[in-house]
């Protein structure tokens, strides 16, 4: 009985297997890269707001403390969005007739809140508590980036799980004294690891087994 396939079919079969394997690996690389790209994570993407509030001016220029607007950051899971009255504390006196601030004045006159769009918006299945991070010595800039230099606010990090786990696995690389949590000009010292280990013990930061447990962030 003669062969159904010629001998050249063996080479064709091996080549097709190589092509399929290469295609699978390439598609895997594309998906892996895409899922970590700013197109998916929205990292460094400016968010359109009802008023383009400049942290660079208010924090970096004037020197407002984060807690002046985000009043619940030390005692709540949510940092808090300031009511219009907070804006009017200053803007009833300065820039009181500026056209760009008319939405603020209208909000105050009509007693209707401004609808701010969250920039660092985690999925509903992720639990994040600002209070515990502040208490444990995690600075605002660690997660939110150089807010004091942002003329327009953007998400400075990927906010993906692997990014969170980097800190949860080795918090000593990121911890700072509680007195420096809201200091946007703070620079990690040369002995950060030594300082971080000391603060980790002093602040009773949980061990890596607990910090990387699924239930810590997914409840």
Image (tube, rainbow, N blue to C red):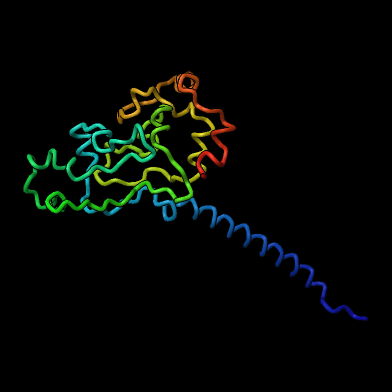
* 31 sits to left or right of 7: left
Residue ranking furthest to the right: 1
Residue ranking furthest to the front: 111
Q: Residue at x 57, y 33 (%)?
A: 210
Which quadrant of the figure has residue 70? top left
Q: Is 138 placed above or below 82 here?
A: above
Q: Is 15 placed above or below 84 here?
A: below
Residue ranking furthest to the bottom: 1
* 20 sits to left or right of 187: right
Residue 178 in the image: x percent, y percent? 37, 24
Which quadrant of the figure has residue 184? top left
Q: Nearer the viewer, residue 69 or 51?
A: 69
Q: Residue at x 39, y 48 (%)?
A: 121
Which quadrant does the N terminus fall into? bottom right
Q: Nearer the viewer, residue 97 or 191?
A: 97
* 175 sits to left or right of 64: right
């Amino acid at each position: 009985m003669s062969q159904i396939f010629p001998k050249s079919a063996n080479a064709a079969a091996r080549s097709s297997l190589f092509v399929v394997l290469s295609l699978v690996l390439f598609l895997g690389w594309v998906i892996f890269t895409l899922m970590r790209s700013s197109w998916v994570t929205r990292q460094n993407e400016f968010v359109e707001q009802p008023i383009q509030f400049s942290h660079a001016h208010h924090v970096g220029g004037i020197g407002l403390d984060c807690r002046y607007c985000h009043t619940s950051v030390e005692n709540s899971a949510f940092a808090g969005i300031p009511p219009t009255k907070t804006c009017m504390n200053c803007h009833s006196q300065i820039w009181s007739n500026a056209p760009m601030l008319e939405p603020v004045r209208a909000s105050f006159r009509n007693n209707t809140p401004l609808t701010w769009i969250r920039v660092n918006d985690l999925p509903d299945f992720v639990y994040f508590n600002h209070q515990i991070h502040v208490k444990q010595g995690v600075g605002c800039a660690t997660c939110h980036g150089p807010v004091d230099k942002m003329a327009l606010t953007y998400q400075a990090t990927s906010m993906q799980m692997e990014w969170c786990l980097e800190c949860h696995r080795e918090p000593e690389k990121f911890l700072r004294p509680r007195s420096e949590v809201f200091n946007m000009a703070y620079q990690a010292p040369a002995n950060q690891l030594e300082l971080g280990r000391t603060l980790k013990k002093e602040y009773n930061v949980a061990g890596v087994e607990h910090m990387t447990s699924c239930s810590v962030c997914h409840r």
